[in-house]
């Protein structure tokens, strides 16, 4: 890819009430790239995603998406520009069926996956279309949460710890789906603590510590020197 980055985050700070949790985060992302944010619990990864989609009430700095400044825009405006957010808690409605959960968010832009493409990517969800959301396994819930934002026309996907709490075989399945989304042209930011998983799918890794970026590595650099990142994670 050439030209301007799809997403450019500069000097991003954010607060929960009086408590400042981001201290000048900065990174860039090109179209079609898959970047992970890694770092310890509480480092500020989720807050970074929440800032990008406009959910942090107090945030400063600059976030440019597709050439436009979004730092002062509201969440619905940012969603319409083509950023989809899949939170860590997944947000599946237990009282709704799989299909109802899937079709709940509105289509915001052209370019989203069609119903057919969705069911082709997630055959499990087709088989369970009429089951209640609660009857799904953790892995299926994660797939539903991802599938749901693919219909909306989002081209940048923010995924918060999709591997969390899932069995290794399911993590692998989710990894295959994420790789496939990448080949379909989606640009992705993944918050991830599972380094093995991060290595399987990502192009580049940004290490966050105390609300700031302390290191950036290509996937090759991570593979060659896992110790460099493990020291940040304290493992
Ligand atoms: P985790 O994987 O545990 O979510 P993280 O890197 O995503 O870690 P954040 O969730 O962004 O970290 O949290 C950054 C800091 O903000 C932490 O110190 C956390 O305690 C604090 N924080 C998070 N949510 C809130 C909130 N709703 N109110 C006040 N402080 C919060």
Image (tube, rainbow, N blue to C red):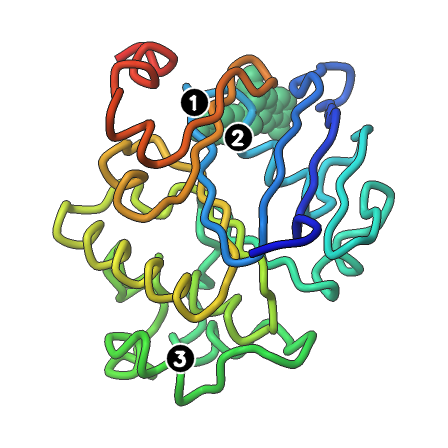
Q: Which disc, if any, is residue 39?
A: 1
Q: CA distance from mark 1 to mark 3?
A: 32 Å
Horizontal side of 95 relative to 46 (left or right) equals left
Residue at image location 44% in from the left, 73% down from the top: 96
Neighbor class of circle 1 (other Cα within 10 Å; few <14, some 14-19, many 20+) is many
Q: Earlier in the sequence, mark 1 or mark 3?
A: 1
The verdict on label 1 being within 8 Å of ligand 1 is yes
**Quadrant in which the N terminus appears:** bottom right
List the residue tagged with mark 2: 45
For the point 79% across and 53% down, the residue is 67
Left or right, residue 210 beside residue 57: left
When the figure is inspected, residue 43 is found, relative to residue 97, above or below; the finding is above
118 over 73 or under it: above or below? below
Q: Earlier in the sequence, mark 2 or mark 3?
A: 2
Circle 3 is placed at which residue position? 118
Q: Position of residue 89 (x, y in %)?
A: 45, 46
Q: Position of residue 125 (x, y in %)?
A: 30, 76
Tag 1 secondary structure: loop
Circle 2 packing at 10 Å, graded few (<14), some (14-19), many (20+), is many
Ligand 1 within 8 Å, label 2 CB: yes
SS category of the residue bearing label 3 = helix
* SS at badge 2: helix
């Amino acid at each position: 890819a050439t030209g301007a980055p799809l997403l450019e985050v500069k000097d991003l700070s954010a607060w929960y009430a009086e408590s400042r949790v981001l201290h000048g985060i900065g990174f860039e992302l090109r179209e079609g790239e898959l970047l992970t944010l890694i770092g310890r619990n509480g480092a500020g990864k989720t807050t970074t995603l929440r800032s990008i989609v406009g959910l942090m009430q107090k945030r400063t700095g600059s976030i440019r998406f597709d050439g436009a400044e979004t730092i002062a825009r509201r969440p619905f405006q940012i969603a319409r520009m083509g950023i989809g957010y899949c939170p860590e808690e997944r947000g599946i409605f237990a009282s709704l069926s799989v299909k109802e959960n899937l079709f709940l968010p509105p289509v915001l832009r052209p370019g989203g996956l069609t119903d057919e493409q969705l069911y082709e990517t997630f055959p499990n969800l087709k088989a369970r279309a009429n089951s209640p959301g609660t009857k799904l396994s953790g892995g299926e819930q994660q797939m539903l949460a991802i599938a749901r934002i693919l219909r909306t026309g989002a081209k940048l996907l923010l995924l918060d710890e999709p591997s969390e709490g899932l069995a290794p075989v399911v993590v692998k399945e989710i990894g295959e789906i994420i790789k496939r989304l990448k080949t379909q042209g989606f640009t992705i930011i993944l918050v991830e603590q599972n380094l093995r998983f991060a290595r399987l799918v990502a192009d580049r890794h940004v290490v966050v510590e105390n609300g700031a970026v302390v290191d950036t590595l290509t996937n090759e650099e991570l593979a060659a020197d896992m110790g460099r990142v493990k020291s940040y994670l304290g493992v």
